[in-house]
Amino acid sequence: MVLYTTPFPNSCLSALHAVSWALIFPCYWLADRLLASFIPTTYEKRQRADDPCYLQLLCTVLFTPVYLALLVASLPFAFLGFLLWSPLQSARRPYVYSRLEDKGPTGGAALLSEWKGTGPGKSFCFATANLCLLPDSLARFNNVFNTQARAKEIGQRIRNGASRPQIKIYIDSPTNTSISAASFSSLVSPQGSDGVPRAVPGSIKRTASVEYKGDGGRHPNDEAANGLASGDPAATDSGSLEDACIVRIIGGDEGGRPPEAFDPPAGGQARNGAGRGQTPNHSQQDGDSGSLGSPSASRESLVKARADGGSGEPGANSKLPYKASVVKKAAARRRRHPDEAFDHEVSAFFPANLDFLCLQEVFDKRAAAKLKDQLHGYFEYILYDVGVYGCHGCCSFKYLNSGLFFASRYPIMDVAYHCYPNGRFSDSLASKGALYLKVQVGSTPQDQRIVGYISCTHLHALPEDSAIRCEQLDLLQDWLADFRKSTSSSSAANPEELVAFDVICGDFNFDNCSSDDKLEQQHSLFTRYKDPCRLGPGEEKPWAIGTLLDKDGLYDEEVCTPDNLQKVLESEEGRREYLAFPTSKSPAGGQKGRKDLLKGNGRRIDYMLHAEEGLCPDWKAEVEEFSFITQLSGLTDHLPVAMRLMVSAGEEEA
């Protein structure tokens, strides 16, 4: 399949579209700014309350008449532009494909050679998030603003989180045999002569002592000096992490005291908590856990290794380049429920070595371009500006695209997009739909392609329209079946492709606890695809939390940084205060101050599902890790979620 790299099939149509948009844009921008000036966020309200001479308020009073006059003057040009723009949409393609070729060891071509369908298996990491990148005036209804700056900062934070090495710490202890520290955390060595913390790449394995091992006798810090510390995201990808940092943590006698946490020395890392006076969204400085410029995470988000015995004497562990310890709080964040087969946590970072990213509500085209530019520092393949405009194939006129956005480290083979035809009221103005992708993730020694299917969607938003969402779920499954059938080049007798995974993710706009969402909770989709957070219709697993934040508290000091939000969501009281709850359980007038009326862990409306059937025979895909991510605190009103799947081959393929 040929992937579309431009929105129109020829340069003539592209030029006409550019002219039409140049005529429309002044009116669009002025109307957006004029409306935005009358919809303040809670952050702006606080600034006005603290400062009677608030500059923004003064600017609003002075410039509103100017904006209004210019808007009226631009209307005739916008009308002419609209007359030219509207018919052009019938020839517009449903997405734009962008590839920034990476010929290095972390590029898509190199990744395909990593897995041949044999051996212990291969893990793939998926993440989904609703970013609320609407025109600024519309975004303010969700209490977020400055869409263009948010898009850039979001891209930086995602790239920063995903480009860290994947770390796992296993603890040998008579009383604890589970994974006790997050693979999503960073491992940091002491500062170099330039005062910059050096990151240690690699993985941490269960062993019997604390030591470093590497290929060819190279020291782990050699790679770190050219990797994360240099600020090069590509240098931190898994393909370049050939050294392994092997750590043994002995538990000691039963009932022994666990290692203590320690504060980093002066001049090391510091957490820069953003108070109410700090500019939200895009003002984090170097050293913040969410900032791109930070070469490392904050103290409580880092996992470090402590030498045996804890004596601290220089000769006790001479192989260690630094004295390390285990941060107990970080270790406690990663839990495995007694009845659970995988690890789960609330993480302050996007998962390391993230392979696939599915985003919703990237409606603003300028914001989408900024986000794409940032994410291309990590993802080689990106689809953006997905959807249709005008009356192209849908029942009503579409002013906004679907808002879907997809990024991948692996090559994209086929793409399909479908617009839901049954949206109504405000949802009918956007071409919400489903995006289907087929990606290649490897090849067998017999040159059979190993592929995976990913579906990204955003369902109808109005809470009372359960029937519409169920119809859209039906369409989602039907379109996916057609897509798999049309893109498959295999037959049962002569398979040319082996399917490794089938994942559906997105913002479903219903949760699994609300009494008003019972119809969606019982949909057949959940019998064909497995939800790692769900026990059954109306019943969540005890560790699952809501993904929709209470928008009124987005800029509170307690949750304005990734670390702060992570801490809040780890407590039941914090979840009741800062997560949105079902309306039937939260009476009108807001939820704060009535914690006794709120049950459960909030509304989980962002889903990550995977299929256990329809894969290659004798192969299985199992969840290895699941996380709720706080790295985008202050930038969106949703929590991103991530899932790591382990795909293991059967004996025949091995």
Image: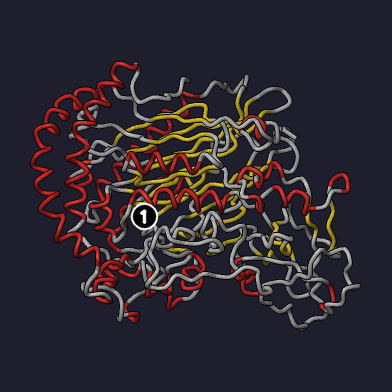
Q: Quadrant of the C terminus?
A: top right
Which one is nearer the viewer's eye here, 181 or 653? 181
Please name the residue shown 22% across and 42% down the image: 423
Q: Dot 1, how many residues are within 10 Å of its Cα: few (below 14), some (14-19), or many (20+)? A: many
Residue 11 seen in this snapshot: yes
Q: Position of residue 195 (x, y in %)?
A: 68, 63
At 31% from the left edge and 22% from the top edge, which residue is drawn? 14
Q: Which residue is mark 1?
A: 521
Question: Does residue 141 appear to the left or right of 96 in the view shown?
Answer: left
Q: Give the residue furthest to the right.
A: 315
Instruction: Judge by depth and name the residue closer to the eye, 617 or 241.
Output: 241
Q: Does residue 654 lie above or below 571 as drawn?
A: above
Which residue is pictured at 78% across the width and 49% down the height? 243
Q: How far across and how far down the image is residue 472, in percent?
A: 31, 42
* Callout 1 secondary element: helix
Residues 60 and 7: in front is 60
The answer to whether 541 is drawn above or below residue 508 in the figure is: below
| Residue 7 in picture, x, y percent from top left | 35, 26
In the image, 617 versus 574, the foreground residue is: 574
Q: Amino acid at mark 1?
A: Gln
Q: Is residue 610 left or right of residue 426?
A: right
Q: In the displayed structure, would residue 325 be above or below residue 207?
A: below
